Image (cartoon, coloured by chain):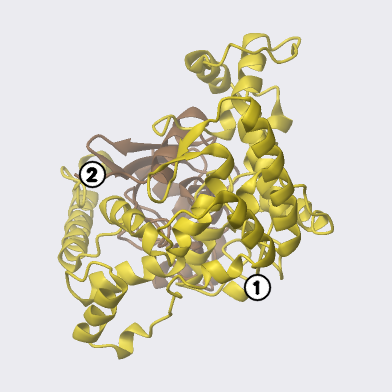
Chain colours: A yellow, B brown
């Protein structure tokens, strides 16, 4: 599933509005569906919480319109979260139905889950229609987001925990309903994303709260339900280490190393590497997510001064080659493509 | 072997499935961060009819830092120097992670249509453009015929 790249162009060209909806529900930064959508209170542009925080740690500007933006200007956008969730749930089914019979869209059928991937692609390849530009898209997204501010969506599960007391109440009611139904049906077990323990689906939210708050003992579920009604959820979150912003330039290498060690982050490499690691950690700000930091390190940034220099040198060499060729050959272009591209470390 | 971020995979897939008209960008085999780009000169510009080659490299920090783009074809343009380097704000301080390969290439194509001699990279070309625009455009046309066919 992870290798399967989902994209707005999966939708047949004749369903341009679905393509657009798909595009609108995506984060302009990571191009994935919005994960914990956060909207700027100033300009209304919406991003994944993690994506926008990662950007703001580098530049306090909205990535879409370059307006001044700081983390305190960000507001959760729960309607978008709900929209994304339900759209994702129905996506495959709808896509199946549309690609199988594009002329007369039949009502969705169950039991046919696998998407005919190849067929989808061939039909989209012929598509001529251009998608809306990111700017226009996000403006519309922003508009949709602003109009949603007045209304809180009814949370259908515990996904909006920790947001506001009013939604906690809804969740509790819902939780109770789930509990009631699970007495009749066989309880579904799910594994906790944090500690990996098998937990009943109906209690996963409460378990997760405890897990993230660092409690190890499992209290009686009824007691916990009561305690959650009275204690605001934010107190649980405040036990986590608070993300601190560091003035890296003022820190010596050994001091930065000490800070990283105290946070439990790997403190190897030079100052530049540690700085990159810490700034990636800051928006994540959760010991439980250190694992994610490891993944990030293996995928994205390996700050390595020597590598960059090598790249620059390669480029310079290629440049001088072009200039030489340009004076002699009629078609210097083809010849001057470097044999080995800069930093081919894939 | 480092993994490739999903966003880059997505962009590559999208560029192949739904290419920008007049622009083709293909990652090089063995290095998905390095793209060979072929761009058609925009209509009703001195670069009309030309096919220009560029190289585009996505640094490790992408999308937090901009891609590095350079013309490989010789250009007569006030914002492109003889090494093919491009003077474009979104490739420097105006970069935003919400931009992508597609939008960068479209912006470069737009720069060909609208040279800006007031923010020059190639000073001699910009001077030429300011003093005698007609002659400068003629030279750009000749260079397109000569180098970008």
The residue at 38%/82% (across/down) is A246
Residue A323 percent coordinates (x, y): 22, 56
Q: CA distance from mark 2 to mark 1?
A: 46 Å
2 and 1 marks on the same chain: yes
Q: Report helix, strand or loop for mark 2.
A: loop
Disc on res. A73:
1
Nearest to the observer: residue B24 or residue B17: B17
Residue A300 percent coordinates (x, y): 32, 54
Residue B88 percent coordinates (x, y): 48, 63
- Residue holding disc 2: A337
Work out which quarter of the rendered image holds the N terminus of chain A and state it: top left
Please determine whether, in this image, residue A278 is positioned above or below residue B24.
below
Nearest to the observer: residue A104 or residue B35: A104
Q: Chain of mark 1?
A: A
Q: Chain of mark 2?
A: A
Residue A109 placement, left or right of A56: right
The residue at 55%/59% (across/down) is A49
Residue A328 placement, left or right of B124: left
Mark 2 surroundings within 10 Å by alpha-carbon count, few (fewer than 14), some (14 through 19), many (20 or more): some
């Amino acid at each position: 599933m992870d290798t399967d790249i989902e994209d707005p162009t999966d939708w047949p060209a004749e369903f341009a509005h679905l393509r657009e909806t798909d595009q609108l529900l995506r984060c302009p930064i990571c191009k994935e569906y919005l994960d914990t959508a956060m909207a700027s209170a100033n300009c209304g542009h919406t991003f994944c919480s993690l994506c926008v925080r990662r950007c703001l740690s580098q530049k306090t500007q909205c990535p879409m319109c370059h307006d001044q933006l700081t983390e305190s200007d960000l507001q959760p956008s729960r309607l978008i979260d709900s929209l994304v969730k339900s759209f994702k749930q129905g996506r495959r089914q709808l896509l199946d139905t549309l690609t199988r019979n594009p002329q007369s869209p039949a009502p969705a059928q169950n039991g046919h889950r696998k998407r005919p991937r190849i067929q989808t692609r061939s039909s989209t390849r012929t598509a001529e229609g251009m998608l809306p530009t990111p700017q226009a898209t996000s403006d519309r997204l922003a508009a949709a987001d602003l109009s949603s501010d007045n209304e809180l969506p009814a949370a259908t599960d515990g996904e909006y925990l920790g947001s506001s007391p009013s939604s906690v109440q809804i969740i509790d009611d819902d939780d109770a309903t789930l509990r009631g139904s699970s007495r009749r049906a066989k309880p579904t077990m799910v594994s906790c994303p944090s500690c990996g323990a098998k937990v009943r689906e109906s209690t996963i939210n409460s378990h997760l709260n405890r897990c993230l708050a660092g409690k190890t003992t499992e209290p009686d579920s009824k007691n916990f339900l009561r305690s959650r009604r009275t204690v605001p959820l934010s107190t649980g979150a405040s036990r986590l280490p608070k993300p601190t912003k560091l003035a890296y330039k003022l820190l010596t290498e050994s001091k930065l190393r000490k800070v990283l060690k105290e946070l439990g982050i790997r403190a190897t490499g030079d100052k530049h590497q540690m700085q990159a690691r810490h700034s990636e950690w800051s928006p994540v700000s959760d010991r439980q997510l250190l694992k994610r930091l490891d993944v990030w390190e293996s995928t994205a940034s390996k700050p390595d001064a020597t590598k960059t220099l090598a790249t620059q040198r390669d480029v310079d060499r290629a440049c001088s080659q072009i200039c030489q060729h340009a004076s002699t050959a009629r078609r210097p272009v083809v010849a001057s493509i470097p044999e080995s591209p800069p930093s081919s470390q894939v | 072997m480092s993994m490739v971020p999903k966003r880059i995979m997505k962009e590559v897939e999208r560029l192949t499935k739904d290419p920008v008209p007049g622009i083709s960008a293909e990652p090089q085999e063995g290095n998905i961060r390095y793209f060979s780009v072929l761009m058609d000169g925009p209509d009703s510009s001195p670069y009309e009819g030309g096919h220009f080659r560029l190289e585009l490299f996505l640094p490790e920090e992408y999308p937090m830092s901009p891609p590095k783009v350079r013309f490989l074809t010789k250009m007569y343009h006030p914002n492109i120097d003889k090494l093919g380097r491009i003077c474009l704000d979104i490739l420097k301080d105006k970069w935003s992670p919400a931009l992508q390969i597609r939008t960068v290439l479209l912006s470069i194509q737009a720069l060909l249509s609208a040279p800006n001699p007031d923010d020059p990279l190639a000073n001699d070309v910009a001077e030429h453009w300011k003093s005698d625009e007609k002659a400068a455009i003629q030279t750009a046309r000749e260079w397109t015929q000569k180098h970008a066919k």
